[in-house]
Image (spheres, rainbow, N blue to C red):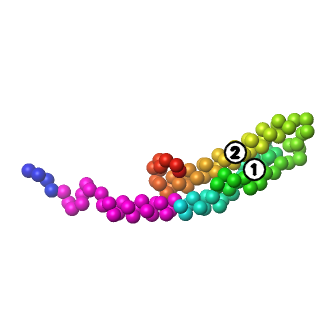
Amino acid sequence: MKARMPQGYGRPDMNSLMRQAQKMQEDMKTKQAELEATEYTGSASGELVTVTMNGKHEVTAVKIKPEAVDPDDIEMLEDLVAAAFNATCAKVDEAAGAEMGKITGGMNIPGL
């Protein structure tokens, strides 16, 4: 005896899936624009060096406190700038991942 399943059971509604995908895509574009407009700040060594960038990883400001500048130890200043830059990049990436994860429901979509 063959069991009968209710209408549409077991088969996805392709139109509904397409609408959901389009809505997700629109939500992602909106969130991406918001993230790109947001500014993020990271610092190194107790805020001796602070880097600010937007969500597109474009540096908008670098602040260096006078006590971080030692003419005899330029390498330390270079390291502080690099560390502040990397800390800020990590914040941008973390924020983007968290916000996009909310939209995609945790699905791992390449390129996001």
**Label 2 with label 1: CB-CB less than 8 Å:** yes
Local SS, label 2: helix
Q: Main secondary structure of the magenta part?
A: helix
Question: Residue under circle 2?
Answer: 87
- Amino acid on which the number 1 mark rests in the picture: Val
- Amino acid on which the number 2 mark rests in the picture: Ala
Residue at 72% across / 52% down in the picture? 59
What segment is highlighted magenta in the picture? 5-28
Percent position of residue 17, x then y? 36, 60
Residue at 30% across / 61% down in the picture? 13
Q: Which mark is residue 51?
A: 1
Q: Residues within 10 Å of mark 1 (few under 14, many from 20)?
A: many
Whether residue 50 sits left or right of residue 100 in the image: it is right
Percent position of residue 9, x then y? 24, 57
Q: Which mark is residue 68?
A: none
Asked if the stretch drawn in magenta spans residue 34, the answer is no
Q: CA distance from mark 2 to mark 1?
A: 9 Å
70 or 105: nearer the viewer: 70
- Up-down relation of residue 83 to residue 20 (above or below): above
